[in-house]
């Protein structure tokens, strides 16, 4: 059990307040919820969630007014809750989210003299740091910066910011199925938003269907582009293209189990859990060389990488997998061997160790009131 000592020398669990989405669809909400559950169960950490996306009563759901009221409510909650915890940890995206979600948590932690752990997991980091005058100065105010991939650490170093790496975790409930002779059943499972460039996947799928007319594509997840992407699929004449929306978490393993090839074509990215889920499932991966993906995928060994927006290369890789069972067998076995390092027992233990180091460090002890 992770412990701290109060002023009387009594041992108590470390208390960690984690700010992250609760209702917004995306990777951060599930990762934060799973981290809290694992910390409480396996390490005795008194971890709790502070949602960055409160749901307001219907009369207050007016555009712009809603944004201001949510910010006020979120900030007020931080001011009340932060002094009850020993460490504040923020799941941070970039751009506007950093401004309205991460900075209030940072300033509340500074006000109450609590260590602040900035967990940055957004592939747009380079753009964020280049476009914001306050990003670098405020990041330097964090006690520790943690990146979700080595890519984040490299970009931070370019701006003289030090970052540790604790990767995204994979759900061990994803079932493994050995694959060799593949059927043309493709899938993708990213938010339906512009940075994930689903049209590239559609164009690649159209090329695959020219050779394999019965090929299938399952498009998982949700997003504000869903209607336009469904229209695009119809306009392109794609057959056997199915949008699932967001499925209950217990059904997700079935989708991975049924598929034969995983496609993802982001223009920017960090360390998506869907790649790790594919590794765990034995599902061969084709991805673009975006952000942190080349750090996750060893091209030709654990997956196949193509240039950004290159639908021809993506289709050629898919056809190659359909026609080369030896490659499929070698690649999926190597990828599955990578998966255990991303299991929650390792990831939660890394966070637990970081909390202990942060609270034990002389700098933290002298700078913050940790009683």
Image: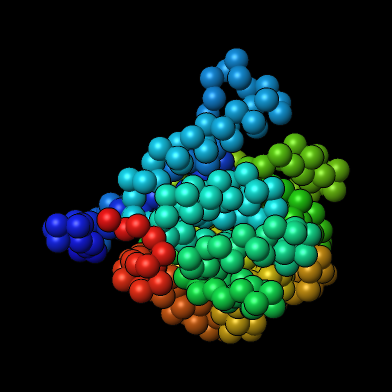
Q: Does 279 appear above or below 73?
A: below
Relative image position of residue 69 (x, y in whole percent): 60, 28
Q: Quick one: 205 or 36, which is closer to the camera?
A: 36
Q: Is residue 207 left or right of residue 12?
A: right
Q: Quadrant of the N terminus?
A: bottom left
Q: Quick one: 306 or 20, which is closer to the camera?
A: 20
Q: Quick one: 1 or 359, which is closer to the camera?
A: 359
Residue in the picture at 72% in, 64% down = 129
Relative image position of residue 95 (x, y in whole percent): 70, 53
Residue in the picture at 57% in, 51% down = 102
User: How many marks are shown on the rendered structure?
Assistant: 0
Q: Residue furthest top?
A: 59
Q: Is residue 135 left or right of residue 369?
A: right
Q: Report whether residue 69 is seen.
A: yes
Residue in the picture at 44% in, 79% down = 337
Q: Does 47 appear above or below 64?
A: below
Relative image position of residue 75 (x, y in whole percent): 52, 38
Q: Quick one: 85 or 244, which is closer to the camera?
A: 85
Q: Quadrant of the C terminus?
A: bottom left
Q: Quadrant of residue 155?
A: bottom right
Q: Residue furthest right?
A: 235
Residue in the picture at 55% in, 46% down = 104
Please name the colour scheme applied to the rendered image.
rainbow
Q: Report whether residue 123 is seen.
A: no
Relative image position of residue 356 (x, y in whole percent): 31, 68
Q: Is residue 290 left or right of residue 90?
A: right
């Amino acid at each position: 059990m992770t412990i701290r000592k109060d002023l009387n020398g009594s041992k108590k669990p470390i208390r960690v307040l984690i700010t992250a989405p609760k209702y917004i669809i995306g990777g951060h909400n599930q990762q934060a919820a799973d981290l809290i559950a694992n910390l409480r169960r396996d390490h005795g950490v008194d971890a709790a969630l502070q949602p960055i996306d409160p749901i307001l009563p219907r009369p207050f759901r007016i555009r712009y007014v809603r944004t201001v009221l949510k910010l006020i409510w979120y900030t007020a909650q931080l001011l009340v809750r932060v002094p009850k915890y020993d460490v504040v940890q923020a799941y941070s995206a970039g751009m506007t989210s950093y401004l309205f979600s991460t900075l209030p948590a940072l300033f509340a932690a500074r006000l109450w003299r609590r260590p602040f752990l900035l967990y940055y997991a957004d592939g747009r980091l380079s753009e964020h740091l280049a476009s914001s005058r306050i990003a670098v100065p405020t990041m330097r105010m964090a006690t520790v910066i943690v990146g979700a991939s080595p890519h984040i650490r490299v970009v931070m170093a370019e701006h003289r910011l030090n970052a540790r790496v604790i990767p995204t975790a994979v759900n061990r409930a994803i079932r493994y199925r050995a694959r060799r002779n593949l059927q043309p059943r493709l899938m993708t499972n990213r938010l339906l938003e512009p940075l994930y460039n689903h049209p590239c996947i559609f164009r690649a799928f159209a090329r695959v269907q020219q050779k394999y007319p019965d090929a299938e594509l399952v498009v998982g997840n949700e997003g504000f582009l869903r209607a336009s992407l469904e229209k695009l699929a119809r306009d392109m004449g794609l057959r056997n293209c199915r949008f699932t929306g967001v499925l209950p978490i217990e059904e997700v393993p079935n989708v991975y189990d049924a598929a034969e090839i995983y496609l993802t074509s982001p223009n920017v990215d960090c360390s998506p859990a869907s790649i790790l889920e594919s590794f765990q499932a034995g599902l061969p991966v084709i991805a673009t060389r975006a952000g942190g993906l080349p750090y996750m995928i060893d091209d030709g060994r654990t997956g196949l990488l193509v240039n950004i927006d290159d639908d021809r290369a993506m289709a050629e890789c898919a056809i190659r997998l359909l026609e080369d069972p030896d490659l499929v067998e070698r690649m999926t076995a190597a990828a599955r061997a990578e998966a255990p390092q991303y299991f929650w027992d390792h990831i939660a233990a890394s966070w637990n160790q970081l909390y202990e180091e942060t609270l034990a460090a002389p700098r933290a002890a002298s700078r913050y009131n940790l009683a």
